Image (cartoon, coloured by chain):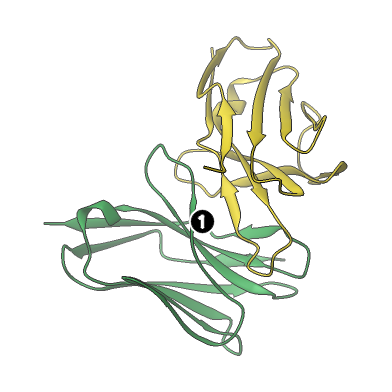
Amino acid sequence: DAMVIQNPRYQVTQFGKPVTLSCSQTLNHNVMYWYQQKSSQAPKLLFHYYDKDFNNEADTPDNFQSRRPNTSFCFLDIRSPGLGDAAMYLCATGSLAPTDTQYFGPGTRLTVL
Amino acid sequence: GQSLEQPSEVTAVEGAIVQINCTYQTSGFYGLSWYQQHDGGAPTFLSYNALDGLEETGRFSSFLSRSDSYGYLLLQELQMKDSASYFCAVQRDSNYQLIWGAGTKLIIKP
């Protein structure tokens, strides 16, 4: 089945220690998104790619970076995680179909010690 | 600014019908989506309305009134597995990004 896969599902890191989260998709969608979601809040868009075009949200901290080496893969790098970065990180994909459905991966729950 | 408002929490009884409302104020409007998210899980797409009226998908229906900047999600024959958070999200223009509401936690009692 076509899907969005995120690894790892759970990630523990230390304060200030860089961490990379990965996402892959078999849907062949042009658009990939990274969201941060904290408890009882809506997903917050960090950035997205349309093909290789990178679009950063204005309020996304510089501490967060992303790479998309090809259509299938996208990475989220957190250069110096702080305690406030502990959250669920969701990767999603989308096409440009009129419904604009976004397909989400299962998420990576990040804990910062 | 851009804003979507939906109730933070709704409680209903198993087998009943519940309606979750969403009002929006955005600089543009292309369509309204609804997503379901179980605790610890990822959001999953439920429905999308671009035009006024009711869209039905099984036990779930979604309604849109563009003139009122208002939509709702209707869940019928509630089951315990419907306990989840429900988010409305607006596609503001032909750009593919969504603006998300804060979510409504649906609690279902036996």
Q: In the picture provided, is B74 more to the left or to the right than A91?
A: left
Q: In the picture provided, is B57 more to the left or to the right than B94?
A: left
Q: Position of residue B27 (x, y in %)?
A: 75, 73
SS label for mark 1:
loop
Q: Chain A is drawn in which colour?
A: yellow
Image: A63 above or below B56: above
Q: Position of residue B95 (x, y in %)?
A: 78, 63
Q: Residue at coordinates 69% horizontally, 12% vertically from top-left?
A: A16
Q: Chain B is drawn in which colour?
A: green
Image: A46 above or below B101: above
- Residue placed furthest toward the front: A1
Q: Residue at coordinates 71% horizontally, 49% vertically from top-left?
A: A29
Amino acid type of the residue that numbered disc 1 sits on in the rendered structure: Ala
Q: Where is residue A32 in the image (x, y as percent from the top left)?
A: 72, 44
Q: Name the residue under label 1.
A: B102
Q: In the picture provided, is A17 more to the left or to the right than B104?
A: right
In this orientation, which residue lies closer to the viewer: B33 or A88? B33
Q: Residue at coordinates 57% horizontally, 43% vertically from top-left?
A: A2
For residue B96, what is the image quadrant?
bottom right
In this orientation, which residue lies closer to the viewer: A102 or B37? A102
Q: Dividing the image into 4 quarters, which one contains the C terminus of chain A?
A: top right
Chain to which the residue tagged by mark 1 belongs:
B
